[in-house]
Image: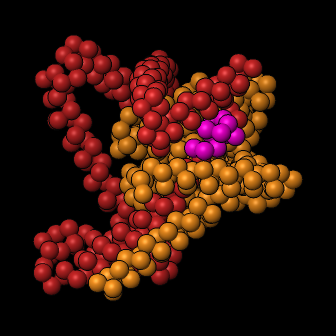
Chain colours: A orange, B red
């Protein structure tokens, strides 16, 4: 069978499951189920009390590539934090290593201020495009972590092994650190330094982004994700079994 | 209406066309997909220009602030950013001076940073083993050390071949498992945007 049709069928199943579950779950209050996002929002108050700042490193996920979805998920994860930070008038420093992501992050921060009816108060240099390549980005963002009076460092998005430079900078600064990425190399950089409450690995980054929004459609999309995963697992198992039987049968 | 309806309509339409252009072998959809992707690339180039200007503006402002501690760093950054642009405008992206800067300044600098990441990783592994003596951290450290040894001549010894095969199988299995989850996450996040439930472009 053509792989495009298999992908189309999976996309259709995902859409149907997502919409059906969204309708079924529309009355449930999901905001109690949140985990990391709550901790992140709590950081706004903590840093404000300490007189320190939050540095959000969003990585270099270009919105025109598949990495863009990791950037969108990272922005969703910090969406409550940006609104709260705008309310406290303590905007985080957000660094990006990609121009399209820079525009999106700046828009999101402006929207956070607009929600409070004070768009003029949105600082121009809160969102910074620091470098166009992953390693240079990590080097520059690590400098930002060290230079500012950083109390908390959130490293979320599309990052490879260069994430270790950012984590190391945050550790040296003594900042509370949270990390999440969808790449194996990036996860390896986070794993030894962060415990499981402060870390999002692989698909957790996407699911946390959905959980933060806490609307029925986001929970439904998580159900759809689980359904598709089991379909793929069943497909892999059946294919392996058939290959084995074919091998035994000669 | 123009704040969210129009951007959402454009996002849904173009998203659906590009997605179906990949999945369905219809020539009209494929050509439309190619046009839309080209437009997106042009928009991306303008985004780079805006980001570049914002970078210059930020560091020029720091330069003008007398009490700023980062004036020297900002000066070097502005100088190299503007200098790089002037060089490319004068000689084109493949000019001799541009190639020189890429080969002898940028590439060695990035290589040094890459080497630093390996050191940072090992140091953080050792630090983690001191503070969190768990099985998973021990496995992480042993794997990191074996991988480093595997990269040397020792790693290619014939008697180590079965171990290499075993390690490859474990790594490939783990990577595929991670990748399945990531692909599903990307698909569902994209679907929410394409269907208009999420609007990252207009704060929704």
Residue A219 visible to the viewer: yes
Q: Residue at x 38, y 30 (%)?
A: B73
Quarter that holds the C terminus of chain A = bottom left
Quarter that holds the N terminus of chain A = bottom left
The percent coordinates of residue A218 (x first, y second) are 70, 50
Looking at the image, residue A195 sits to the left or right of residue A80; the answer is left
Picture quadrant where residue B34 is located: top left
Does residue B103 belong to the magenta stretch? Answer: no
The percent coordinates of residue B25 (x first, y second) are 43, 40
Who is closer to the viewer here, A116 or A28? A28
The percent coordinates of residue B124 (x first, y second) are 41, 65
Who is closer to the viewer here, B33 or B173? B33
| Residue situated furthest front in the rendering | A249
Q: Residue at x 19, y 16 (%)?
A: B91
| Residue situated furthest top in the rendering | B90
Q: For the image shown, how many numbered marks are present on the structure?
A: 0
The percent coordinates of residue A74 (x first, y second) are 58, 46
Who is closer to the viewer here, A138 or A181? A181
Who is closer to the viewer here, A137 or B171? B171
Q: Is residue A148 above or below residue B150?
A: above
Q: Is residue A118 above or below residue B168?
A: above
Q: Is residue B42 above or below residue A153?
A: above
Looking at the image, residue B203 sits to the left or right of residue B151; the answer is right
Q: Which residues are magenta?
A: B190-200
Picture quadrant where residue A245 is located: bottom left
Residue B59 visible to the viewer: no
Q: Residue at x 62, y 54 (%)?
A: A14
């Amino acid at each position: 069978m053509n792989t495009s049709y298999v992908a189309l069928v999976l996309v259709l199943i995902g859409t149907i499951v997502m919409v059906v579950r969204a309708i079924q779950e529309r009355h449930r209050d999901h905001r109690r189920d949140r985990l990391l996002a709550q901790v992140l929002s709590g950081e706004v108050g903590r840093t404000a009390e300490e007189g320190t700042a939050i540095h959000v490193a969003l990585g270099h996920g270009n919105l025109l590539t598949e990495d863009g979805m990791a950037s969108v998920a990272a922005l969703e994860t910090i969406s409550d934090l940006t609104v709260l930070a705008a309310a406290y008038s303590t905007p985080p420093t957000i660094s990006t290593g990609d121009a399209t992501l820079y525009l999106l992050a700046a828009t999101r921060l402006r929207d956070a201020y607009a929600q409070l009816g004070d768009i003029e108060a949105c600082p121009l240099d809160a969102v910074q495009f620091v470098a166009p390549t992953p390693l240079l980005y990590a080097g520059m963002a690590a400098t930002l972590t060290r230079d500012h009076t950083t109390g908390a460092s959130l490293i979320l998005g599309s990052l490879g092994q260069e994430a270790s430079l950012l984590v190391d900078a945050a550790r040296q600064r003594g900042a509370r650190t949270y990390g999440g990425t969808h790449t194996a190399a990036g996860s390896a950089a986070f794993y030894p330094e962060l415990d499981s409450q402060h870390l999002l690995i692989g698909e957790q980054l996407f699911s946390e982004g959905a959980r933060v929004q806490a609307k029925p459609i986001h929970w439904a999309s998580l159900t759809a994700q689980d359904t598709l995963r089991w379909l793929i697992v069943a497909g892999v198992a059946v294919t392996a079994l058939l290959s084995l039987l074919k091998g035994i049968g000669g | 209406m123009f704040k969210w309806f129009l951007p959402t309509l454009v996002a849904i339409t173009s998203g659906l066309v590009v997605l179906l252009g990949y999945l369905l072998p219809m020539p009209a959809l494929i050509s439309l997909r190619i046009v839309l992707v080209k437009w997106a690339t042009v928009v991306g180039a303008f985004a780079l220009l805006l980001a570049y200007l914002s970078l210059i503006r930020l560091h020029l402002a720091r330069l003008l602030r007398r009490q700023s501690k980062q004036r020297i760093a900002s000066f070097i950054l502005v100088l190299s950013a503007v200098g790089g642009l002037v060089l490319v405008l004068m000689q084109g992206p493949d000019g001799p001076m541009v190639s020189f800067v890429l080969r002898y300044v940028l590439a060695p600098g990035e290589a040094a940073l890459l080497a630093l990441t390996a050191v940072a990783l090992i140091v953080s592994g050792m630090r983690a083993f001191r503070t969190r003596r768990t099985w998973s951290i021990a496995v992480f450290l042993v794997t990191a050390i074996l991988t480093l040894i595997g990269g040397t001549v020792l790693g290619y010894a014939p008697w180590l071949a079965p171990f290499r095969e075993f390690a490859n199988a474990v790594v490939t299995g783990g990577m595929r498992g991670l990748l399945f989850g990531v692909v599903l996450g990307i698909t569902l996040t994209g679907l929410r945007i394409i269907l208009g439930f999420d609007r990252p472009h207009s704060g929704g």
